[in-house]
Image (tube, helix red, strand yellow):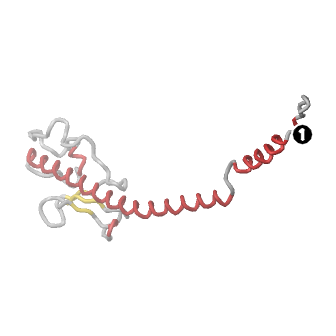
Amino acid sequence: MTGKTMPETENPMAENAEPAQKSRRKRNGFTLVELMVVIFILGLLTTIVVINVLPSQDRAMTEKARSDIATLSQALEMYRLDNLTYPTSADGLKALSQPPGSLPASSRYRKGGYIKNLPDDPWGRPYQYDNPGRRGPGFDLYSLGADGAPGGEDENADIYAE
């Protein structure tokens, strides 16, 4: 060695460093094929989840309707115990939250009513109430199901109080 330093362009290490940096730059990021594979896998997973979750939602809505109907039936029974009769069809279920005008002044309607809020069925429609019911004395309390029409099968079936 003569004491001279080599310029950087002549340094063999610098020449070897450039291709390594270029290859590192090429490796940063994803290729189109890799992205397509990931998107395809996510689509498959989403499809599997949707197929397994949607039937559970229908069952959950039906069970919520049954639960609401049971709660409203209990409120109707408390109303009957206090007032000796069920609300008329004209008074409807609103009689559970507000005293109906058809009640005599001597009635024992509970202050605050029998329920705080009258719920809608899980499909956003009001519960149906008939007095007298289809089986004679008593009441019918029901939801028309997912389709909102009388009759039907599966999630479209009417849900009656038991």
User: Given the current orientation, which residue lies at the most extreme top position?
Assistant: 3
Provide the secondary structure element on which disc 1 rests: helix
Considering depth in this image, is 50 or 28 the residue closer to the camera? 28
Give the side of residue 87 with respect to residue 65, left or right. Answer: left
How crowded pointer 1 is (Cα within 10 Å; few <14, some 14-19, many 20+) is rated as: few
Residue 124 drawn at (x, y percent): 37, 53
Residue 19 drawn at (x, y percent): 79, 48
Q: Quadrant of residue 59?
A: bottom left
Q: Quarter of the image containing the C terminus?
A: bottom left
Which residue is depicted at the point 28% across and 65% down? 158
Residue 140 drawn at (x, y percent): 20, 60
Considering depth in this image, is 142 or 48 the residue closer to the camera? 48
Give the side of residue 137 with respect to residue 57, left or right. Answer: left
Image position of 150 with respect to 110: above or below: below
Amino acid type, mark 1: Glu
Image position of 33 with respect to 3: above or below: below
Residue labelled with disc 1: 10
Which residue is depicted at the point 22% across and 50% down? 91
Considering depth in this image, is 2 or 44 the residue closer to the camera? 2
